[in-house]
Every structure is written in C-alpha cells, then in structure tokens.
C-alpha cells in the first residue's frame, strides 16, 4: 500500500494555463484565449497535454459549481512555445445579462488536472444593441 501511495506522489501534475483573457466584441466578449502550459508542476517538460476545460461562473469570482463548462482539445500533446488555446463564448450558452468569471484548467492524457487559472471577470449585456459596422466610403 505504501509503494502505491509513493507512486501517486511522484506523478507529475500539469501546470496551469496562463494569460487567460476574454476577447471583446462590439458589445460582449466573443472568445476566451489562453497561453498553453509548457511544463508540468514539477518543472518537467509537458509532453502529454490532452486538452482544457473552460468554466464560467456567476459573479466576478468563481465559487461553487460552474454555470457551464466547455472541453477543448489540445492541438499538440507537446505544446509549442507561444501556443494558445481558445473557445468561443457562445459555447457557454449564457442567456442572461450579468457579470461572470471564467477560468481554464489544463488536462493531460491521463486525465490529471492542473489547478485552475486565474479568474477572468467579464460582463454580458444582451439588451444593448450591437455597435454599427464601420462605414465604407466609395470614391
């Protein structure tokens, strides 16, 4: 039994995604973006990234269960330097005006999860009309 517990203790956990942000559209955020982790929590190279889970919570700080989550496959098991992940906000099916927060969790191919990224606060406002498109001038 002790040997089994020791093996679990040395298993490398995935490091968290960084630079999570909500890309702003004319009225509401349209996409969440983040930088892919490059290493495991123990500092070893990450070579088994399976994907991500992006979660949305009510309010400006995550607490309790998420309102919605979206799974995103990783394009590479061995993330390239500068590689990013993203998911459209529409995938969360948010239909009520309000303030929300989002965070991202990296998941390796053995289904080990990173600690959540820092939360990103954002607002959704469905009652405001969309901004008019940029005018085009013809000469």
Image: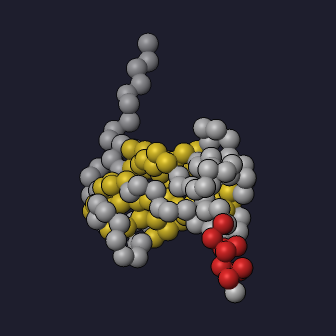
Q: Is residue 31 visible to the viewer in this orientation of the structure?
A: no
The furthest residue to the front = 2
Q: Residue at x 43, y 47 (%)?
A: 21
Q: Is residue 104 left or right of residue 82?
A: left
Which quadrant: the N terminus?
bottom right
> Quick one: 21 or 133, which is closer to the camera?
21
Q: Is residue 36 left or right of residue 116?
A: right
Q: Is residue 94 left or right of residue 129?
A: right
Q: Position of residue 27 (x, y in %)?
A: 33, 47
Q: Is residue 9 above or below residue 36?
A: below
Q: Quadrant of residue 135?
A: top left
Q: Residue at x 53, y 55 (%)?
A: 16
Q: Quadrant of residue 98?
A: bottom left
Q: Quadrant of residue 139?
A: top left
Q: Position of residue 129 (x, y in %)?
A: 29, 50
> Quick one: 85 or 112, which is closer to the camera?
112
Q: Position of residue 18 (x, y in %)?
A: 49, 48
Q: Is residue 133 visible to the viewer in this orientation of the structure?
A: yes
Q: Residue at x 38, y 36 (%)?
A: 133
> Quick one: 33 or 116, which is closer to the camera?
116
The furthest residue to the top = 139
Q: Is residue 122 above or below residue 59?
A: above
Q: Is residue 100 left or right of residue 14?
A: left
């Amino acid at each position: 039994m002790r040997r089994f517990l020791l093996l679990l203790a040395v298993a490398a956990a995935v490091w968290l995604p960084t630079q999570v942000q909500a890309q702003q559209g004319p009225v509401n955020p349209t996409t969440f973006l983040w930088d892919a982790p490059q290493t495991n929590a123990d500092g070893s190279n990450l070579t088994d990234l399976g994907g991500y889970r992006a979660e949305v919570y009510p309010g400006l700080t995550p607490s309790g269960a998420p309102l919605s989550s979206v799974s995103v496959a990783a394009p590479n098991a061995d993330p390239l330097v500068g590689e990013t992940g993203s998911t459209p906000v529409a995938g969360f099916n948010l239909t009520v005006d309000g303030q929300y927060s989002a965070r991202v969790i990296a998941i390796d191919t053995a289904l080990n999860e990173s600690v959540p990224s820092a939360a990103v606060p954002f607002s959704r406002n469905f009652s405001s009309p969309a901004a008019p498109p940029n005018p085009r001038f013809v000469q």
